[in-house]
Image (tube, rainbow, N blue to C red):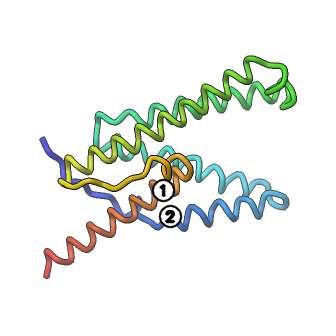
Amino acid sequence: MERRLTVPDWLGFSWWWLLAATVLSSLFRPHLAPLSYLLSGSLFLWSLVQPAWLRSVYPVSRAVYWYLAAYSVIALLNIFDFFHGPAVLLADSWIGTTLMLAGASCYIAGTCYFAGEWRQFVHDSQGYELPMSYLWAMFFSVYYFQYKLHDLREDQRIRAERMSS
């Protein structure tokens, strides 16, 4: 059964807000560490909200699981880092290096799955190709996906206005 894509208002905000949170996080880091961690944590959580939303409207999507795996590995890496120190991580430890490679691989896989599944869902539900660059998705993932969500939300708004008039 075909589903019509509807991006909710709360998900369709401009990507500039994410960029502002990142900049504020960097600015507050030296002075107000708790606020900085809150802002960076928000960005981290938002990078899970996006694929979780896709999973909710497109049940075959697996991207959120790849992101969860990546963040789980990153958590293990931080635990390892806490007990052994960052100097051990790259130079002397095969465990740290393996965790870094596993986390990066899961994140890259999650980004590729998210971009591909999203394009497929838009094609199936809207009947058109969503232009999406895997290169932009790799370098600016959470921002790029938010940019695309905002565009889809604006397209929906414009279509709704045309239908009502």
- The quarter of the displayed image where residue 9 is located: bottom left
Judge from the rendering whether residue 12 lies leftward or rightward of residue 58; answer left or right: right
At horizontal 87% and vertical 29% (from top left) the residue drawn is 87
Crowd tier of the residue under label 2, counting other residues whose Cα lies within 10 Å: few below 14, some 14–19, many 20 or above: some
Which numbered disc flags the more N-terminal residue, 2 or 1?
Answer: 2
Judge from the rendering whether residue 31 lies leftward or rightward of residue 118; answer left or right: right
Query: Which residue is situated farthest in the bottom direction here?
Result: 165
Q: Quadrant of the C terminus?
A: bottom left
Crowd tier of the residue under label 1, counting other residues whose Cα lies within 10 Å: few below 14, some 14–19, many 20 or above: some
At horizontal 60% and vertical 25% (from top left) the residue drawn is 102
- Residue 109, given in percent of the width and then of the height, sits at 48, 33
Name the residue tied to disc 1.
144
Determine the secondary structure under disc 2: loop
Judge from the rendering whether residue 70 lies leftward or rightward of residue 58; answer left or right: right
Judge from the rendering whether residue 96 lies leftward or rightward of residue 101; answer left or right: right
Q: Are marks 2 and 1 in contact (CB under 8 Å)?
A: yes
Name the residue tied to disc 2.
15
**What kind of residue is marked 1?**
Tyr
- Residue 59, given in percent of the width and then of the height, sits at 29, 36
Q: Nearer the viewer, residue 84 or 36?
A: 84
**Image label count:** 2
- Residue 24, given in percent of the width and then of the height, sits at 70, 64
